Image: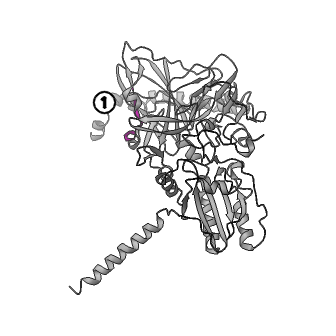
Amino acid sequence: MLESQLQPKTYQKELAMLSFKGHTSKIWAGLAGIVILLGALSLVISGCGGESKSESLSLKDAVYGSPGAELTMEKPATSELYSGPALSLAPEVNPVPNTRVHEVRIDVTHSEVTVTDGVKFTAWTFGGTLPGPVLHVRQGDKVIFTMTNRSDQTIKLSPPMPHSIDFHAAMVNPADKYREVIAGATIKFEWVANYPGVYMYHCGTPAILQHMIYGMVGMTIVDPKEGYPSKVDREYALIQNELYLTKMKDGTYLVDMEGARQKRASYVTFNGMPAQYVKNPLKAKPGERIRLYVLNAGPNGTSSFHVVGTLFDRVWFDGNPDNETRGLQTVLLGASNGAIVEFVIPEAGTYTFVDHEFADVELGAVGQIVAKPDQVASK
Amino acid sequence: MRRVWPAWVAILLVFLTGTIVVAKEKPHRAKSIIPGSKGAVLIFVASLCPCTDAHRVMVDNLLEQAGPEGIKFYAVFSNLGETEERAEYFYRNLGWKMPYYLDSDGELAKRYKATRTPQTVALDRAKKTLYTGPIDDSNLHQGRVENAYLKNALEDILAGRPVRHPEVSQMGGCWIVRDTTSVPCPPELQK
């Protein structure tokens, strides 16, 4: 009696059918056996045939390594700090240009960056922005990358210093492509995007922690060669990163390296500013399917990314559709992990996204998507 | 009352000891460079240069090994615009236990031809240069040290033999800025 009270009434019939008593249960058992046999057969076939479907998706036409990097004292012909149609500033994501070879320039510069009201510091940046521009290419595409270290042009802000770039999306010799580029010098190298995904890039010059907390992080998105298996109405890029700052007596802010070593963040942000999308929410319409490219740039903390009021009906861990999970409430991202999350905006309203480690929300890891029927497209 | 005073003395002693420990840990600013019995090491640093941080453990170890042998270590801030607060803050973050020197007029950088941070200069007791160059070459090998230049130089100095590589040209590091109206030109750019 007590047991039947605890079982919701609507499920009692189904539970009885699965109790393996009587004819109904025999039919179910027979069907289950056929399913198991078919499953086993498909496993044997795929095993005998070599690569599975998902492996061939990732590894076909992979290119390992590339010609040696060129390091010159060539000065950039342009004053633009970044250029190339494959680049955009988060949260916007430009479509992948209709070409298989992408010429991309992202220069390093030191510049004053405002974090929030009354808080600004001299950041070291890719392309003059914190985080750096989003690079969007397609699996199998070649990236011809150029970077000038312009830290010699801002000696009033900080001393000229070496910098570098480390693309997690590339498979190349780090000692060559990710080498230190002295102030005033230009590096040029190429790489092929073998795997689809959401990847980090960052400065790899020691002390790497220091370069990263000064702002030298960014996102690369590599679309699958055949495109994503689902269509969406809107997409945004969110890069979570921590800032470690301390206020000096003169009111200026310096990067707090000891705080970073102790993992005591001053701010945790989406796209460089704490809670900026609470003040200026991202836009959507009710019923739309949204795709978020999420990267936890760290450098130290994890991110438990969650959107209040909806569920992720597709999550591709590290942004690769081979790594698909369904129906997630939260996606856990270690430092440098990325993900693509897709969800439906169920109805008009405000959908708050957070790092569900709520200490990080207190430090700024919170934003909102406002869904209205008459919402104007934000891109 | 007689029974109480030993407790007060004990409390006072604990307080004084604590004060001394705190004072020892606080970065100490040196007014001048005074070599030890076997010489001195100057490490040119800058409060906004990340390159020093990568060597903080190596320098700590060298200080521990060579300090008791008579080598005095100084961190020298020679960049224009360094303030005592910034220098002290950076220095405290590094956790080094040696005194630091604020080279406000850039005199030391000029005298010892220091152009980079971190650049090191090892001196004998008479302040004659025995070694000048980087701490090591880890910046060229993704953090792996193939040549521990300063360590080797100190071993030679303490053993009383000539330094095997008295001058190593500095690759990498931040530039020491003494004039914000013109960009300094380090050796690798003078081509």
Residue positioned 61% across, 74% down in the render = B68
Q: Position of residue A289 (x, y in %)?
A: 46, 20
Residue positioned 63% across, 31% down in the render = A107
User: Relative to residue B144, is residue A212 drawn left or right?
Assistant: left
User: Relative to residue A350, is residue A88 drawn left or right?
Assistant: right
Identify the image quadrant of the N terminus of chain B: bottom left
At label 1, the amino acid type is Lys
Comparing B172 with A236, the one in front is: B172
Q: Position of residue B29 (x, y in %)?
A: 51, 62
Identify the image quadrant of the C terminus of chain B: top right
Residue farthest to the bottom?
Answer: B2
Q: Within the magenta stretch, is there residue B144?
A: no
Q: Is residue A252 visible?
A: yes
Q: Within the magenta stretch, is there residue A362?
A: yes
- For disc 1, the neighbor class at 10 Å (few under 14, some 14 to 19, many from 20) is few
Region rendered in magenta: A361-368
Q: Position of residue B176 (x, y in %)?
A: 62, 48
What colour scheme was applied to this rendering of the protein?
Answer: one colour
SS state under label 1: helix
Whether A84 is drawn above or below B113: the answer is above
Whether B80 is drawn above or below A8: the answer is below
Comparing A12 with A69, the one in front is: A69
Q: Which residue is mark 1?
A: A9
Whether A204 is drawn above or below A92: the answer is below
Comparing A297 with B139, the one in front is: B139
* Label 1 chain ID: A
